[in-house]
Amino acid sequence: MDALPQRGEVGGLAALEARIARDLALIAYPEPRWVPERSTAAGERMLDVLVVGAGQGGLAILFALMRDRITNVLAIDRKPEGLEGPWRDFARMVTLRSWKTVTGPDLDIPSLTFQSWFEAQWGAAAFAALDKIPKDLWADYLLWYRRVLSLPVRNGVELVALAPCREGLVASVREGARETSITARKVVLATGIETPGRWWMPDVVAALPARFRAHTGDRIDFAALAGKHVAVLGAGASAFDNAATALEHGARVTLCCRRPQLQRVQPYKQLSYAGFFRGFPHLSDAERWRWMNHLLSLREAFPRETWERASRHAGFTLMTGAPWLGARIRGDRVEIDTPRGALTADFVICGTGFEMDVAAHPALAPHAALIATWGDRYRPPAGQENPRLARFPYLTSGFALTERVPGGAPWLADVHLFSFGATVSFGPSGSSINAMKFAVPRLAQALAADLFVADAEAHYRALVAYDTPEFELPDALLPDATWHGECTPMPQPSPGRDACSDAA
Ligand SMILES: Cc1cc2nc3c(=O)[nH]c(=O)nc-3n(C[C@H](O)[C@H](O)[C@H](O)COP(=O)(O)OP(=O)(O)OC[C@H]3O[C@@H](n4cnc5c(N)ncnc54)[C@H](O)[C@@H]3O)c2cc1C
């Protein structure tokens, strides 16, 4: 599309924000806050839910909870405000890969969609002309979403450890040089797509000195690569985006792909229907494993514009069928062995994704032996073994971690995971824009149910003690007075029908 008109030329955000306030007021039922306050033995007020990570997932979870009047909640994020998530960090694409009409954080409220936000500033014609959503605009939208909903977020606060305490969970956090703790009844880890795991590169590359290599999830000084030869490993969208960024900075790039052909079919597209999102978590373990073994064994394809962005440069070379078998430093360069011959580069970038490993998450690492993975819970039939799938955590229907040994760590039921780590249990769910409208409400519903059930006795006592009359009667009529006025006769059942069928 052509350059956007100046913001504010059309409509304006003020009118949209008024509409949002009205929309939320119209669906505010039921309004009472209902979660009883809890304090620690030391008298500190506990949070009902601590959300770790204020990217799109963490924000949408806060919103969903607040709609259910669970308001004693907080999200923390280690990054500064506006820099959460990958968008202004290591996401090196120009636009989102999703289609522009994707909804998610809005949780089905039309005035909160990206499209509404965009049209309020640039108009409907500009949206019609938009191809895909520029990633910086997506980051701007998320920031606005947080502001317009007054979501409670504290930036610059990092979770460093998590442990059970008598009253719930205690999160040790670092805020600048200060270490402190937050107690909460529930903790949701919305800490990014690789949670709980790590960005992964083959051992032969990891063994190289750090100044010769990077992962696409790292910060990279692309300006320093001008005039150099960069070898990129991987054939996913991020590998291509990093190759394109290096080319745009004047590097020459050879992109090596392990498989004989590029993956151009996007299987996730085929799965973008409501029945799958809603129904997949209800399949048996054997079925979920079978589906995810197929899905996660395929590479995700990337869109046409990603291919064109890299391939239009004369300095771009694609080598298929070229896994890296070995690598070493020769002089001041990296020499790489591939089945198609040796390759020499000044710098290498791995677009090789991430691997699940509960022990790689700093807050979960000390408890890793207690946490059940799919490998602990399910033994696949011959031919369907997949160690990669086996490392995914095995989650409850409410996204909570589960114990490897029953009774070993019951508190894990209060630690919920909203990331790609939920994929084998739920299919696309956490860390995915297009699954958000299904996954966030499911998580929020589970959190609300758990909080209610934990306090069911207190809620029951509140019901029994409830004695607020709907209207006042004159004192003379209380408590044993006789009413002398006229009564409205009770309706009589129609002939031939009993009272029950009339009532129905
Ligand atoms: C490069 C890239 C491109 C993508 N493009 C698309 C796309 O086009 N369409 C799509 O549907 N999906 C896309 N995704 C997938 C997904 O939508 C994104 O990963 C998205 O950012 C996930 O949102 P999130 O809130 O789960 O995690 P994030 O947005 O990553 O947010 C997690 C937050 O947690 C914080 N955090 C982490 N650890 C801690 C800690 N210990 N203490 C405090 N804070 C912490 C981080 O600072 C971060 O801000 C992409 C992913 C990547 C990596």
Image: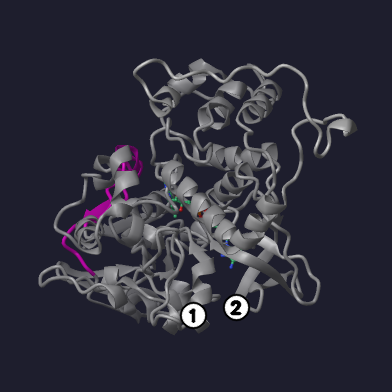
Callout 2: SS: strand
Q: Kindly identify the residue that appears in the image at 31 percent across and 71 percent down.
A: 374
Horizontally, residue 382 falls left or right of residue 346, namely left
Q: Which residue is mark 1?
A: 409
Residue type at numbered disc 1: Ala
Q: Nearer the viewer, residue 111 or 372?
A: 372
Q: Position of residue 311 (x, y in %)?
A: 29, 44
Q: Nearer the viewer, residue 229 or 109?
A: 109
Asked whether the viewer can see residue 104, the reply is: yes
Instruction: Work out which residue is located at the far right of the displayed protein and give it.
Output: 475
Q: Nearer the viewer, residue 115 or 4?
A: 115
State the image quarter where residue 298 is shown: bottom left
Q: Kindly identify the residue that appears in the image at 50 percent across and 73 percent down.
A: 412
Asked whether the viewer can see residue 5, the reply is: no
Q: Position of residue 51 (x, y in %)?
A: 60, 59
Residue 25 versus residue 427 in the image, above or below? above
Q: Which residues are magenta?
A: 298-323
The CA span between labels 2 and 1 is 9 Å
Q: For the residue with label 1, is its CB less than 8 Å from the closest atom of ligand 1?
A: no
The circle on residue 164 is 2
Callout 1: SS: loop
Bin the neighbour count of mark 2 within 10 Å (Cα to Cα): few under 14, some 14-19, many 20 and up. Answer: some
